[in-house]
Amino acid sequence: MEGPTAPISILLVDDDRVHSRILEVRLRAQGYRIAVADSGERALAQARLCSPTVILCDWLMDGMNGLDVCRAFKAEPALASAHFILLTSRSRVEDRVEGLDCGADDFLSKPVDPEELLARVRSGIRLHQANERLKLLAEELRQQKLRLDQELEEAASYVKSLLPEAIGGAVRADSRFEPCNELGGDSFDFFWLDDDHFVVYLADGSGHGLAAAFPSISVHNQLRSRSLPVDLRDPAAVLQTLNAGFPMERHQGRYLTLWYGVYQPSSRTLRFASAGHPPAMLWSRTGAFPYRWLKGQGMAVGLFDDTTYGNESLEVGEGACLLVYSDGLYEVPRPDGAMGTLPEFMQLVEQCRGLLADDDGLDRLLSQIHDATDNVPFTDDYSVIRALLS
């Protein structure tokens, strides 16, 4: 059960003792707690002790006048929210504009009408209380945002913990992943399925936040644990099975784009399928074959039950390099307000093919992207995988 409400505190600031006393009696009769000061300096000292809800201050006073007092109150964060009413016999619009510019919230004409006095005070109390409720609500929202940001940061750390480390050997692969302020749905992996089949894939869930991350993390866990009831060496069958298991109706309207490839070193063959994902890029570091953009024909996973997927297969020549990425890497707002496009990104990657073969190739590619976008912050998670296929 809530305790009794504390009385409203009102501060009267007036160097006219008679006028101040009349106002004090009228207001005290309404149950308000009254503090009185005869100068601006004493008013500030009183206010720091009683935190008034409403301040009634005469405009014309010796020393600090009403405008000076108003400025002083509004300059102190702890006192600025008090509802400040200037008492004045001035009626010109210019005077009232000057008072408002100094921070006054209301005016009361002298001589003061008793009923108008009480009405203005009641109005000021309502406005002050409404502002205090808004401040409390803003603080609650701030705390909730802090908790949400912390949860998203923890979720991003979890997603990072699932991602693969760089590997060497017959296939050398490394990656970069960067979550934005709002966690997205990127997840990816690369691993040896057996001695002669190397899997690489990248999934990107639609939207942002935890709800977007869950489907792609679920896909990631099924593929890594090899619990998906399908031959993981068959990209199209993998996408077909995932599409059957992730209808968007069961995932808050979310869907996934996915690029999935399997490289077989013994035959130097790369098989891949795509579910609405941006095309991967394949090129030769030695110039043994022209670069190609590897784009599949299937729709995103989860959109339509009757979607079918087909495998693409090609022989990989000497010095092959594969680049797989998410759209967060190129859908970046530019300083002119336009959004980066896939064709622009494809052109940039083609220009960077030479440096991508270096050990720090991915970092140099990201540096080129930042330069091209004038270091505008990314608005989505981005992921990129580079695999050097010997």
Image (tube, grey):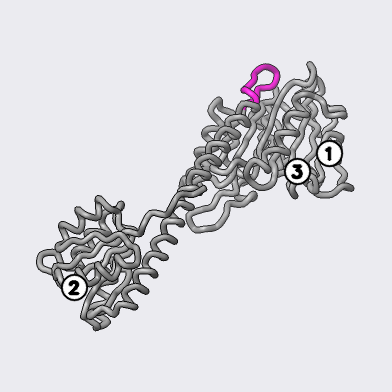
Q: Which residue is mark 2?
A: 19
Secondary structure, mark 1, is: helix
Nearest to viewer (mark 2 / mark 3): 2
Q: Is residue 290 visible?
A: no
Secondary structure, mark 2, is: helix
Q: Is residue 197 visible?
A: yes
Whole-angstrom CA distance, mark 3 to mark 1, is 23 Å
Secondary structure, mark 3, is: loop
Q: Which residue is mark 3?
A: 295
Please give the name of the residue rendered at 70% of the width and 26% of the height, measured from the top-left corner: 190
Please give the name of the residue rendered at 29% of the width and 65% of the height, measured from the top-left corner: 28
Please give the name of the residue rendered at 76% of the width and 34% of the height, measured from the top-left corner: 260
Residue 108 on image: x %, y %: 28, 76
Whole-angstrom CA distance, mark 1 to mark 2, is 80 Å
Judge the density around disc 2: few (<14), some (14-19), many (≥20) Cα neighbours within 10 Å: few
Judge the density around disc 3: few (<14), some (14-19), many (≥20) Cα neighbours within 10 Å: some
Q: Nearer the viewer, residue 94 or 380?
A: 94
Q: Which residues are magenta?
A: 164-174
Residue 198 on image: x %, y %: 75, 24
Check the image and name the residue furthest to the right: 306
Q: Is residue 226 above or below residue 100?
A: above
Q: Which residue is mark 1?
A: 245
Q: Amino acid at mark 3?
A: Lys
Q: Nearer the viewer, residue 173 or 33?
A: 33
Residue 309 on image: x %, y %: 85, 42
